[in-house]
Image (tube, grey):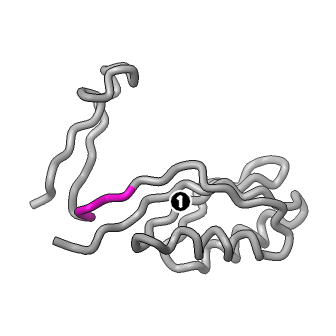
Amino acid sequence: MNNPVNISGILVHARPERAEEVAATLRALPGVEVRAVLDHGRIVVVAEEEVGRVGDILMAASLCSGVITAALVYQHEVADPDETITVDSSTPPSAPDTFCTKESQP
């Protein structure tokens, strides 16, 4: 079994004229993936990091020149990184017991 990891969703709001530059800086951080650069300087980031490191990533994002704010919008700790979660889109989200099922990869 591997060490637990955090999967985090971070929304970064940068000055629109600096958004691409900020996105490039964020892409250089280990474990960080820029998923989208949106209008008005919003940048959608997904980070996969060791437990306890999300604060470091948020701080680094906040300190990037051109960043207005960086906010953690989603966080999930995965005890076993080899575990996958399958989402059944036919089940409404109001039924959390059946919405996600866990499987271990071989």
What type is the residue that disc 1 sits on? Val
Residue 77 position, x and y percent, is 37, 58
Residue at screen point 43% across, 59% down: 7
The quarter of the rendered structure image containing the C terminus is bottom left
- Where on the picture, by quarter, is residue 60? bottom right
Decide: few, some or many residues near mark 1? Use Cα within 10 Å; few <14, some 14-19, many ≥20.
some
User: Is 63 included in the stretch rendered in magenta?
Assistant: no
Identified at 50% across, 58% down, the residue is 8
Q: Position of residue 6 (x, y in %)?
A: 41, 63
Number of residue marks: 1
Q: Which residue is mark 1?
A: 46
Closer to the camera in the image, 21 or 73 = 73
Q: Is residue 97 above or below residue 3?
A: above
Residue 83: quadrant of the picture: bottom left
Q: Is residue 45 left or right of residue 103?
A: right
Segment tinted magenta in the rendering: 77-81
Q: Position of residue 17 (x, y in %)?
A: 90, 62
Residue visible at 78% across and 59% down?
69
Q: Is residue 81 above or below residue 40?
A: below
Task: Please give left or right for residue 43 compared with residue 30 in the image.
Answer: right
Q: For residue 78: magenta? A: yes
Tell me the chief SS of the magenta region: loop
Q: Residue furthest left?
A: 106
Image location of residue 3, percent across then percent down? 27, 74
* Quadrant that contains the N terminus: bottom left
Q: Which residue is at a point 41% across and 53% down the rendered structure image? A: 76
| Element type at mark 1 | strand
